[in-house]
Image (cartoon, rainbow, N blue to C red):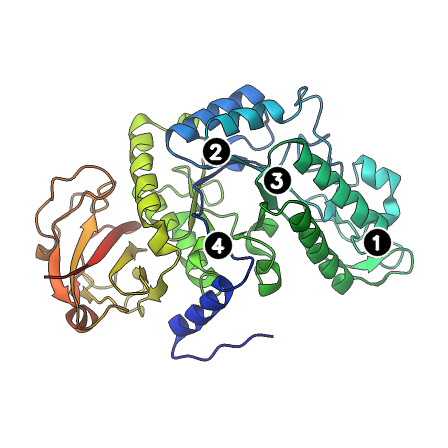
């Protein structure tokens, strides 16, 4: 059990972030821009199509390419195949190597999806070892997502999964495992007596992760778990990233990310830019809102980039460049959330340890009850220093509306740091008096850059 004592939610979050950042397992290298192919292709795996997608991704500066569910035997849908951890010879006649080699030649890392704790009844594993399925009372638990839980507390089941994962990770150059867990443990007993098995299962999962870390010291693991079902300190000791939700709708993610970050530092919070129309909610959002939301995390993409327009690809390249230039700040600084004075506006920021710079997001989540939200303040800065505050102009989030005088004049700079000249104010003024909020349509976001001025 861990506890934290401090003044407010930000202080509590900072203490947990410091604790996790001090852990030996905490990632220290830059968090790579990641493309996950799930919403791009789902189960429709085709080598040529995936290579084409990888080539588009690499051209934009993406650094990690992740092949999701569907690569193993019999896995053309979610009703079969779990547990049979062999590359599907029909879909991949030459194995994964052609895709992996091309991804690596393009300068990207390769990642692969597994769901090691689960099994489909329609699988060779379940047919050969039905007693390896967790159950009580001589009956199978109610299925969820057409699957059951594999009893890793059984030494022979544990050894099988460890051997198969080791074989796949040895065969090709895999730097990253997306570790899923798409159902809860119910009737979680061990056959044949049905004795309680949750604790034994949990420690077995830890041992499996630890065993892979021993065999592959450079391997990184994401805890996906149906999108945020297992985000806790025990898992965070053994993984390098969590997937906070399978919903990448930016309006939903503003709250999901805000509260996941209460425990998880941003560098370990997976946040992806998805397609214009969300696959989970059906809402449509401008690219600038999707990207500004995902920027405050470990940035990635969940989108078939082959279908993106040239304008969208150009804007994505600018957002990726901004991420690369600011991730050292975002992933080491102190998280700041402004108190909510109007539910229509959510303000999130990261302030450097020496308070020399900061990056803030002004996310407009809906329409305010008043004609215009008044002023906003910025916390966490040095009250004795002077700062230049200016919004960055990527994707024109203002929607053409009039902006306050403090924006200054357009600076004429192209690319990710294009914006306005801004205004210079003291940290005390920014904390107490603040700045006029821009008049912005709902479901838009501004990224605001803050930098100390020495003169």
* Circle 2 residue: 108
Which quadrant is the C terminus positioned in? Answer: bottom left
Question: Residue 68's spot in the image, x, y percent?
Answer: 58, 37
Q: Residue drawn 13% across and 52% down?
A: 403
- Secondary structure under tag 1 reads loop
Gap between marks 4 and 2 measured at Cα: 19 Å
Mark pair 2, 3: CA separation:
16 Å
Quarter of the image with the N terminus in it: bottom right
Up/down of 419 relative to 200, above or below: above
Q: Earlier in the sequence, mark 1 or mark 3?
A: 3
Q: Residues within 10 Å of mark 1 (few under 14, many from 20)?
A: some
Q: Earlier in the sequence, mark 4 or mark 2?
A: 2
SS for callout 4: helix
Task: Please report contact status of discs 4 and 2: CB closer than 8 Å, yes or no.
Answer: no
Mark 4 in CB contact with mark 1 (< 8 angstroms) = no
Q: Position of residue 183 (x, y in %)?
A: 67, 51
The disc at residue 154 is 1
Report the residue marked by disc 4.
268
Distance of label 1 from label 3 (alpha carbons): 23 Å
Q: Which residue is mark 3?
A: 113
Residue depth check, mark 4 versus mark 2: number of the one nearer the observer: 2
x and y, in percent, of residue 447 in the image: 26, 51
Q: Are marks 2 and 3 in contact (CB under 8 Å)?
A: no
Of tags 2 and 3, the one toward the viewer is 2
């Amino acid at each position: 059990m861990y506890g934290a004592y401090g003044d407010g939610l930000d202080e509590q979050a900072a203490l947990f972030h410091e604790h996790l950042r001090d852990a030996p397992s905490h990632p220290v290298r830059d968090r790579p821009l990641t493309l996950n192919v799930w919403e791009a292709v789902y189960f429709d795996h085709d080598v040529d199509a995936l290579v084409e997608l990888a080539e588009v991704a690499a051209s934009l500066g993406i650094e990690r390419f992740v092949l999701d569910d569907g690569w193993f035997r019999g896995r053309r849908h979610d009703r079969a195949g779990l547990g049979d951890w062999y590359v599907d010879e029909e879909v991949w006649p030459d194995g994964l190597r052609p895709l992996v080699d091309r991804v690596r030649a393009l300068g990207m890392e390769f990642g692969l999806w597994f769901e090691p704790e689960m099994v489909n009844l329609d699988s060779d594993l379940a047919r050969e070892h039905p007693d390896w399925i967790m159950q009580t009372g001589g009956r199978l638990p109610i299925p969820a997502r057409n699957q059951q839980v594999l009893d890793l507390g059984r030494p022979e089941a544990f050894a099988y999964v460890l051997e198969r994962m080791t074989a796949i990770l040895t065969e090709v150059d895999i730097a990253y495992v997306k570790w899923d867990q798409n159902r809860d443990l119910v009737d979680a007993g061990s056959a044949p007596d049905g004795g309680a098995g949750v604790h034994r299962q949990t420690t077995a999962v830890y041992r499996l992760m630890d065993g892979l870390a021993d065999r592959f010291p450079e391997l990184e693991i994401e805890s996906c778990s149906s999108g945020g079902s297992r985000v806790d300190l025990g898992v965070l000791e053994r993984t390098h990233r969590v997937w906070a939700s399978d919903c990448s709708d930016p309006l939903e993610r503003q709250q999901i990310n805000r509260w996941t970050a209460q425990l998880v530092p941003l560098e370990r919070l997976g946040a992806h830019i998805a397609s214009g129309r969300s696959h989970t909610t059906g809402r449509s959002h401008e690219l600038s809102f999707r990207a500004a939301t995902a920027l405050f995390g470990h940035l990635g993409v969940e989108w078939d980039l082959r279908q993106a327009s040239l304008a969208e690809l150009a804007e994505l390249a600018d957002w990726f460049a901004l991420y690369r230039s600011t991730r050292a700040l975002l992933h080491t600084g102190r998280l700041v959330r402004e108190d909510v004075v109007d539910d229509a506006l959510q303000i999130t920021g990261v302030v450097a340890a020496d308070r020399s710079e900061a990056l803030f997001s002004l996310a407009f989540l809906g329409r305010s009850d008043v004609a215009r939200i008044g002023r906003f303040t910025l916390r966490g800065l040095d009250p004795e220093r002077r700062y230049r505050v200016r919004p960055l102009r990527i994707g024109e989030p203002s929607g053409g509306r009039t902006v306050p005088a403090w924006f200054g004049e357009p600076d004429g700079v192209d690319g990710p740091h294009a914006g306005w000249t801004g205004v210079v104010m003291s940290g005390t003024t920014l904390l107490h008096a603040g700045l006029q909020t821009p008049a912005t349509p709902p479901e838009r976001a501004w990224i605001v850059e803050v930098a100390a001025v020495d003169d």
